[in-house]
Amino acid sequence: KSIVAVVGRPNVGKSTIFNRLVGERISIVEDTPGVTRDRIYSQAEWLTTEFNLIDTGGIELGDEPLLVKMREQADVAIQEADVIIFMVNGREGITAADEEVAKILYKSNKPVVLAVNKVDNPEMREAIYEFYSLGFGEPFPISGTHGLGLGDLLDQVVSYFPTLDTDVHDEDTIYFSLIGRPNVGKSSLVNAILHEERVIVSEIAGTTRDAVDTPFTKDDQDYVIIDTAGMRKRGKIYEATERYSVLRALKAIERSDVVLTLIDAETGIIEQDKKIAGYAHQAGKAVVIVVNKWDTVNSDEKAMKDFEQKVRVHFPFLDYAPIVFLSALTKKRIHTLIPQIKLASENHALRVETNVLNDVIMDAVAMNPTPTMNGKRLKVLYATQVAVQPPTFVVFVNDPELMHFTYERFLENRIRDAFGFEGTPIKIYARRRG
Ligand code: GDP
């Protein structure tokens, strides 16, 4: 998927536009209890084209002077995005900061679409002409608050998307990445897998500026490990952008079938871990929780049970993810990891039979009465699986409004009891039959 970044001064209206472009998706994401809200990277859609949107405003750091902030924003956009939306304020005209950003963007040779915001009515369209001087061709007048002009703007943005998807994703290969805060042991685990797990490593395939992809084979199954952590150790340029490593991790997640979320047994679980784990869940990927540095704690059965308990409390939204305890350093229990990756990947792609699914749903409904609202009762008519990766179900009902989330949760649990789906999130949507 292509990546679009929105760059512009504070208060130019970036967030309003961002929310409009991302539409409802963001609320779906935020509905998940325990998932930290984070809008820096979201999925958006225009007509039939899906893309990822970076809100560079959302990653502004601290109280640096405006120009420093703007330069950073522009740098991130240039690094990460395929197309940049440069947003200016039609009511204020061109400012010094705008010119500064324009210069940086201009030099990057990335496609830039110039959006002139706050053009709320036709009389104001005159205002856009002065923006030609920024050097990005035709300015697109938009109104974030009224939702005007976005269609033309997006047509232009989409026209710049690279058509050829160079990222070949072989269906029979399991792609996985590792995420976790610094020093949790990501690099160590990559090395441990590649050097100790008796895998057959092929030549390193695609090495992008974001990650190193290493293919390997184990027990006749092909894998690709997408390593972003190792990049950091490769030099200055990367170092400079370490602050934005989260974007890099998100891109790796995007390309993964399975995401390993690492936790440090030595230091325990902290807030940052939850946020990072939330990314994997939101992306709808299969997830395996890895508790690393298990050599540093008293690692008996009871300790494992206790730690597992803690993980479940802190990551309620990952209740489907298996937990693997290991040490990347001593390689202890490391052999337990790959089978879990494989299992999670298989479940992520699992398709169940419609008639069995409907038996399960109807049994569930018979067991636990459907919710009512204002005297009207939810009627569940039938269900079908509409997608895999992750498994996605549509339940046809008399009125979707009546589908309370606790009932949806109940149905999810019944589906899980029946089919497993360990390691993968599943999605359920209620639709009106019609
Ligand atoms: P990254 O930042 O997540 O890539 O973490 P690194 O792989 O660079 O590891 C950070 C530190 O933790 C290094 O000093 C490692 O030697 C150490 N480390 C990694 N895995 C383990 C482990 O399983 N046990 C112990 N005791 N230390 C580990």
Image: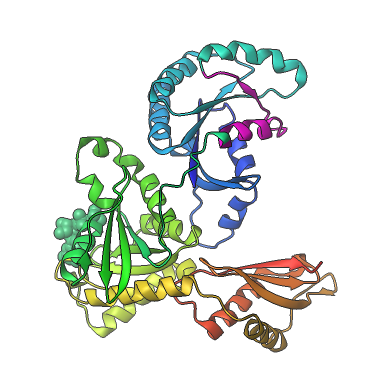
Left or right relative to 326: residue 146: right
Q: How many marks?
A: 0
Left or right relative to 376: residue 128: left
Give the residue drawn at x 60%, y 57%. Answer: 28
Give the residue drawn at x 39%, y 76%. Answer: 343
Quadrant containing ligand 1: bottom left
As drawn, 37 above or below 305? above
Identify the image's colour scheme: rainbow, by chain, secondary structure or one colour: rainbow
Between residues 301 and 281, which one lies in front from this camera angle?
281
Assess whether residue 151 is covered by the magenta stretch.
yes
As drawn, 169 above or below 148? below
Residue 98 screen position, x and y as percent: 49, 18
Specify the quadrant of the image occupied by residue 113.
top right
As drawn, 133 above or below 162? above
Numbered range of the magenta stretch: 136-158
Specify the quadrant of the image occupied by residue 46.
top right
Give the residue drawn at x 51%, y 15%. Answer: 135
Assess whether residue 164 is covered by the magenta stretch.
no
Specify the quadrant of the image occupied by residue 94.
top right
